[in-house]
Image (cartoon, rainbow, N blue to C red):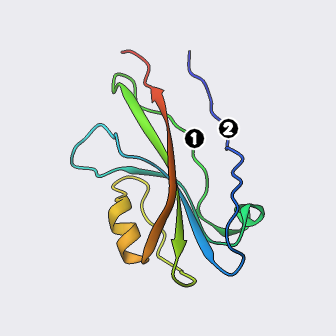
Amino acid sequence: FPVTIGQPSVKFTGETEKLYTLVMWDPDVPSQAQPGYAHWIAINLQGPNNIASNELLNYQGPAPPPGTGIHRYFFGLFEQQRGISPQQPERPHFSIDTFIKENDLSEVTKVFMKVSALSV
């Protein structure tokens, strides 16, 4: 039976004068034509307490389509070089590499979890 995974509580310690971006994405989408799927993006973070007020894309939990196997869901924290105001990306067809390059981000840390899709 399906399990709903609620929005995680994210806490990090960063340098107070720096800004950060939090991204959650799934690179294991069923079609190779799609580079990934964006599940959550928060920008211009100075600490964990302002995530909700800085969401570019609100949280959408893991929901791999039936029969697509195991999906990895990455949480990446990136340092920004300056304040950013990117266009809201599409959830499908999301490329983390393009997002990093377009917004001049540097990876601070990355963790992932695996979720298995239901069998068909």
Residue 24 image offset from top left, x and y in percent: 51, 51
* 5 w.r.t. 100: above or below: above
Q: Is residue 77 left or right of residue 50?
A: left
**Count of marks overlaid on the render:** 2
Q: Residue furthest right?
A: 49
- Give the side of residue 46 with respect to residue 81, left or right: right
Marks 1 and 2 in Cβ contact (< 8 Å)? yes
Give how far across and how far down residue 27 sits, in percent. 36, 45
Q: Secondary structure at mark 1?
A: loop
Please, what is the three-letter code of the amino acid marked with disc 2?
Gly
Instruction: Give me the residue at 46% from left, 75% from top.
Output: 87
Q: Which residue is mark 1?
A: 61
Q: Is residue 28 above or below residue 119?
A: below
Frontmost residue, 34 versus 77: 77
Q: Quadrant of the N terminus?
A: top right
Q: Please state, as top left, top right, bottom left or bottom right, where the C terminus lies in the image.
A: top left
Upstream in the sequence, badge 1 or badge 2?
2
In the image, residue 117 lies at what x, y percent? 43, 24
| Quadrant in the rendering for residue 52 | bottom right
Helix, strand or loop for disc 2: loop
Query: Which amino acid lies under the numbered mark 1 shown in the image of this protein?
Result: Gly
Residue displayed at 33% across by 67% down: 98
- Give how far apart the Cα atoms at labels 1 and 2 are: 6 Å
Is residue 64 positioned above or below 42 on the image?
Answer: above
Near mark 2 (Cα within 10 A), the count class, few <14, some 14-19 or many ≥20, is few
Q: Relative to 10, does residue 88 appear above or below in the rendering?
A: below
Q: Which residue is mark 2?
A: 6
- Seen at 33% across and 63% down, the residue is 97
List the single residue furthest toward the bottom.
Answer: 82
Residue pictured at 72% horizontal, 76% vertical: 16
Neighbor class of circle 1 (other Cα within 10 Å; few <14, some 14-19, many 20+) is: some
